[in-house]
Amino acid sequence: MTTTNASGSSSSCRTSELPGTAALLVDDSGRYLLHLRDANKPIWRPGHWSLLGGHTEPGESCDEAIARELLEETGLTIPGLTPFITLDTLDADGAFTARVLVYLGTLNQPAHEIPLHEGIQLRWTHVDETAEMTMDPGTAAVIHEHRRRPNPRLDAVGSPPTMRVREESDHRGHSIVGAHLVLVRDGAVLLGKRRPDSACAPSTWHLPAGHRQQGESALTCTVREAAEETGLTIAEADLTLVHTLDILDPGSTIPRLQLFFTASRWHGEPRVLEPDGWTEWRWWPLDALPEPLVDHTLTVLTAIGQGTPYTLMGWPS
């Protein structure tokens, strides 16, 4: 991905162009509110961290569109939103593919207090953390531009400069890689309960898990997610792969490869460190698992108990 800047380009939101809109929301400590998009749907940038926002509808101004999108996605009303930059996306051959008008705003509210109606998670993020996350390239470019020039620069007609982001050429198929932790102690497995308002498996029991980030091995992902979600400390050398789940969710064109690791030892006791996603952690006997349980979690725990190393789910027979 490469970016180029060109100041002075008109980014007025004309109805005939119907550009998208996005909100670059910053808190007083300089963190950015990022939105983790659904990973198992045929949508733009599945499984990527991005900005809140969406399409402009016919007859709607960009100001109206971003206000509506924020309200629909989070229930938020942000006063004082100001156009910050116009983001143009080009394909690998340099052809224009999309335009988004990015607004800048200030918000100081814990992420877990914001009701999320679309996507997986909201998170306040420092810029140095984005290098370890699966970021939408345009979002990453906008954040770094804001760090370089934090104040809006509007021309005489109120339009911000334009930034162009060019996609890298990649003709290979993609799969989303997830890592799950199967901790068993005295015949009981560690499961967490998702928040009732979670966009991902609400009020359902699940294993500690997460998606592999850019430049990260599945082992590293497992260790990181365990520490972030439960506070447990695990060494990569103590992890063993016990199952592989090859899954294609209904309606999705993007397969997911889910890797399940067990640990021979760990340090600490599980705690809720991500209250925006989980409400509790508990050890459940393997012969008395709770309900409701994520479907593929039950499938995999059963397969592990039977010594089965690989499971297919959702693929056409």
Image (cartoon, rainbow, N blue to C red):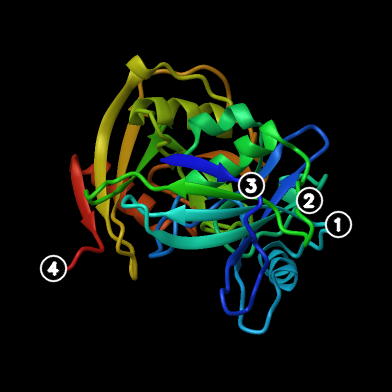
- Mark-to-mark CA distance, 2 and 4: 49 Å
Q: Under tag 2, what secondary structure?
A: strand
Read off the residue under disc 2.
105
- Mark-to-mark CA distance, 2 and 3: 21 Å
- Mark-to-mark CA distance, 1 and 2: 7 Å
Q: Nearer the viewer, residue 124 or 2?
A: 2
Q: Under tag 3, what secondary structure?
A: loop
Read off the residue under disc 1.
80
Q: Nearer the viewer, mark 2 or mark 4?
A: 2
| Amino acid type indicated by mark 4 | Ser
Q: Nearer the viewer, residue 59 or 70?
A: 59
| Amino acid type indicated by mark 3 | Ser
**Rendered location of residue 120, percent (x, y):** 55, 54
The answer to whether residue 46 is above or below residue 152 is below
Q: Nearer the viewer, mark 3 or mark 4?
A: 3
Quadrant where the image shows the N terminus: top left
- Mark-to-mark CA distance, 1 and 4: 53 Å
Q: Is residue 159 left or right of residue 43?
A: right
- What numbered label is drawn on residue 7? 3
Which is nearer the N-term, disc 2 or disc 3? 3
The answer to whether residue 106 is above or below residue 240 is below
Read off the residue under disc 4.
317
- Mark-to-mark CA distance, 3 and 4: 53 Å
| Outermost residue toward the right in this view | 79
Q: Do callouts 2 and 3 mark residues in contact (Cβ within 8 Å)? A: no
| Amino acid type indicated by mark 1 | Gly
